[in-house]
Image (spheres, helix red, strand yellow):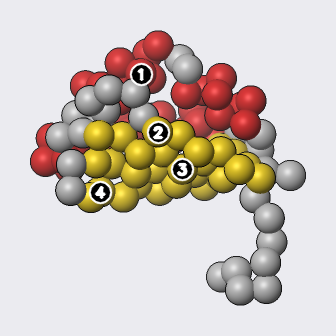
Amino acid sequence: MSVIVVGKFNGDTARFRQALQDRAAEFADIAKRAQAAGAIHHRFGIGDGFVVIVDEWGTADQFQAFFSDPELQQFIASTGAALGPPDLTIGEAIASPDQF
């Protein structure tokens, strides 16, 4: 049974967009580490003054262990994605008839 993680980070979205381009190799390295730690899916979204993550992880504990890494926290802050603590929601992933 996997979990869905939705996180909303108040941030500097222009700086974050630029970091996605300028630091693509670092993002790719983090993706590899996340997959090794139990991540199944990952996606970003950007809104007016915020960055959203939508992840699927094997377990909530796997996500929490990965996300609490101080090196990762420093990277997130350096990209402009987080101007303060994120709002995280974690729930059990379930199947539904309207899923696609």
Q: Amino acid at mark 3?
A: Val
Label 2–label 3 contact, CB within 8 A: no
Residue 46 quadrant: bottom left
Q: Callout 4: few (<14), some (14-19), or many (20+) C-alpha neighbours within 10 Å?
A: some
Residue 93 quadrant: bottom right
Distance from disc 1 to disc 3, alpha carbons, whole Å, reads 17 Å
Residue 95 to residue 69: above or below: below
Q: Callout 3: few (<14), some (14-19), or many (20+) C-alpha neighbours within 10 Å?
A: some
List the residue tagged with mark 3.
6
Distance from disc 2 to disc 3, alpha carbons, whole Å, reads 8 Å
List the residue tagged with mark 1.
73
- As drawn, the residue found furthest toward the top would be 70
Q: Amino acid at mark 1?
A: Gln
Mark toward the viewer: 1 or 3? 3
Residue at the spot x=36%, y=58% of the render?
Answer: 45
Return the x and y of residue 5 as percentages of the image width and height: 60, 47
Q: Which mark is residue 17?
A: none
Secondary structure of residue under mark 1: helix
List the residue tagged with mark 2.
87
- Is tag 2's residue or tag 3's residue first in the polypeptide sequence? 3
- Is tag 1's residue or tag 4's residue first in the polypeptide sequence? 4
